[in-house]
Image (spheres, rainbow, N blue to C red):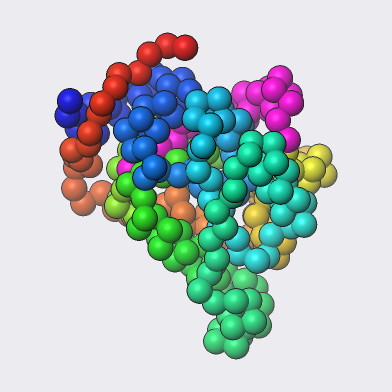
Amino acid sequence: MKEDLQQIQAQAENWRPEEVLRWAYTTFQGDIAMASGFGAEGMVLMDIASRVHRHFRVFTLDTEFLFPETYDLIDRVEKRYGIKVERVFSSLTPEEQDKVHGPALWTRDPDLCCNLRKVEPLRNKLRELRAWITAIRRTQTAARGFARKVEWDTKFQLVKVNPIADWTSEMVWTYIRRHNVPYNPLHNRNYSSIGCTHCTRPIQAGEDARAGRWPGFNKTECGLHVAEPQVAAPLVQIEYPVHCEEN
Ligand code: SF4
């Protein structure tokens, strides 16, 4: 059975995360993987995925500047879910980056630093996939406000699946508590969004949840979830072997 992405897109907006994931894993088989930075949303999505597909794939963009707490959480995830997290590195080591672009590039040009350590490594990783899964939510940033649960990724040219796009932060934390999902202990120290050590600080009362990312810069995204201008309708022919059912 063939369907185009636009038809699935409309249906998927009414699906629960389990249903979105079930459709995605059945459709793309081994050619789909979840990207995660191991934030609260990502932890929830991994837990849901583990109930849908035992051998779900997860990869992370290891900038080599992550917090020790994040590396520890990755180890705990591997043990809890019996998976091996695929670590994706920049083609430049931190030392090579210093030599080529000067020391502490993130203090001068965080866009270039993110491009070298996150965006280009992601682009290379996505070349081996037909679809990727993310834990972005529409209310996180303005750029994410238009995310659909299933969409064509104009930037990286593959299908992008965002099963909890319509969730609130409260729903995320309710799920974590209800299912005893592990999470980064930095969240308990007012780090609401956690990235690299160089570019993340705890937030103050009343600040936006992402105010602790790239402090001092007018930057709220790494560039992973910023869509390219829409130049063509996202019409894609995909194999669609099953329909989604309620649990
Ligand atoms: S978050 Fe900061 S240190 Fe990490 S890749 Fe981006 S600019 Fe570089």
Judge whether residue 220 can be spotted in this image.
no
Q: Nearer the viewer, residue 134 or 201?
A: 134
Quarter of the image where one finds residue 176: top right
x, y (%) of residue 95?
64, 82
Q: Nearer the viewer, residue 17 or 203?
A: 17
Q: How many badges with numbers are in the image?
A: 0
x, y (%) of residue 63?
61, 64
Task: Identify which residue is drawn at 65% across, 23% down.
Answer: 175
Query: Quarter of the image containing the N terminus?
Result: top left
Judge whether residue 83 can be spotted in this image.
yes
Task: Identify which residue is drawn at 78% across, 46% down.
Answer: 186
Q: Is residue 49 left or right of residue 131?
A: right
x, y (%) of residue 157?
29, 52
Q: Nearer the viewer, residue 109 or 16?
A: 16
Q: Name the residue at the right extreme.
A: 189
Q: Is residue 55 left or right of residue 156?
A: right
Residue 164 is inside the magenta segment: yes
Task: Identify which residue is drawn at 38% across, 18% down.
Answer: 14
x, y (%) of residue 236?
20, 40
- Is 184 placed above or below 114 here? above
Magenta segment range? 159-182
Q: Name the residue at the top extreme.
A: 246
Q: Is residue 96 left or right of residue 225?
A: right
Residue 142 is inside the magenta segment: no
Q: Name the residue at the bottom extreme.
A: 99
Q: Nearer the viewer, residue 199 or 65?
A: 65
Task: Identify which residue is drawn at 59% across, 48% down.
Answer: 84
- Is 110 placed above or below 245 here? below
- Is 87 placed above or below 206 here? below
